[in-house]
Image: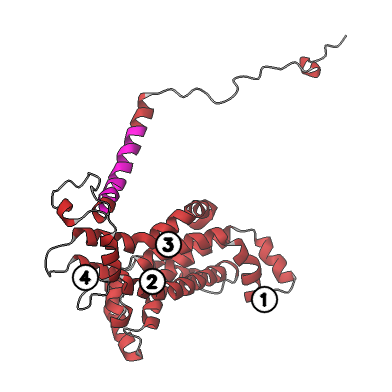
Amino acid sequence: MNQIPAKSFGTRVDTGPQGKPPRKLTPSRIGIYLFLVMAAAFFLLPLYVVVLTSLKTMPEIRLGNILEWPEIWTFEAWIIAWDSACTGLTCEGIKVGFWNSVKILIPSLFVSIMAGAICGYVLSYWKFKGSELFFFIVLFGAFVPYQVMIYPIIRIFSVTGLYGSLAGIVLIHTIFGLPIMTLIFRNFYSSLPKEIFNAARVDGGGFFAIFFHVLLPMSTPMLIVAVILQVTGIWNDYLLGLIFGGRDNIPMTVQLNNIVNSARGDVAYNVNMAATLLTALVPLAVYFFSGRWFVRGIAAGAVKG
């Protein structure tokens, strides 16, 4: 008589250890935890001091207890930094630079990402003779220091009338953002199955129809990565905004420098810290709300070579 397997009667067959193994506090694990705690403290302690200082009064700050919580919590420094801090010859606060940064950021963000996406699309599916050389030249631009090209661009912009204009600073951010944008979109589109593009071509799709209706809807992770990179780079930029922004388009970072380095009267450390936090709020908010998409975009091939 053939033996019937025990599992036929519902008897549990032992296949080895089940569930997660118990976590043991080994020396290596303790070392990892200590390193993570030290790394977190290294980055969070300065932020902790900046936030507390911005919420203190100047008499309390002069006591030198930078790690202690404020005895009197006040947002007066934030109000002064936003509305009435002196940023040079005027005392209109950092709000002027904020709106200038917004005016610079929105068109620069859209133009640079779309230009990079289209270049990556062309270099992936519409290759032409010399396309690889063209890609190398574009990518090489990411490693050229800004300082090398500033003077020639100033001369060109002066002749064309773009120097000191909003269109000029938008064009500058587009030019310097194009290499990295082209790289991440080209790598992503190259990782997609070629059959998607071929099927769209068979269905009669043209250049822009395939891009806007097929590939771009699939590019959400890459778009999030591109937005985070460009928002951080454009919003935190100081050098290009100082040189090419002009008097009417001074970004927030330039105004922050004017507030912090002001030589008139006593140094208001709480106002300086509040202005610093106000300047950093936009990149922090972008990272906070889209951080998981950034990780997903990296995993999807944003930086694959």
SS label for mark 2: helix
Nearest the camera: 246 or 149? Answer: 246
Q: Residue at x 25, y 61 (%)?
A: 77
Front: mark 3 or 1:
3
Give, as a single range, the part of the protein colored magenta.
Answer: 33-50
Front: mark 4 or 2:
4
* Type of amino acid at the residue the image marks with label 2: Phe
Is residue 238 at least partly visible in the picture?
A: no
Upstream in sequence: badge 3 or badge 1: 1
In the rendered view, would you say 248 is above or below 261?
Answer: below
Is residue 205 found left or right of 18 in the rendered image?
right
Which residue is denoted by mark 2 in the rendering?
176
Count neighbours of disc 1 (C-alpha within 10 A) and say few if under 14, some if 14 to 19, many if 20 or more: few
SS label for mark 3: helix
| In the image, residue 40 lies in the stretch drawn in magenta | yes
Is residue 296 found left or right of 160 in the rendered image?
right
Name the residue furthest front: 72
Upstream in sequence: badge 4 or badge 3: 3
Give how far across and how far down residue 176 sits, in percent: 38, 71
Which residue is denoted by mark 3 in the rendering?
229
Name the residue furthest right: 1
Upstream in sequence: badge 4 or badge 1: 1
Main secondary structure of the magenta stretch: helix
Nearest the camera: 195 or 184? Answer: 184
Separation of residues labelled 3 and 2 (CA atoms) = 12 Å
Give how far across and how far down residue 115 sits, in percent: 50, 73
Upstream in sequence: badge 4 or badge 2: 2
Numbered circle sitting on residue 258: 4
Q: Residue at x 34, y 61 (%)?
A: 280
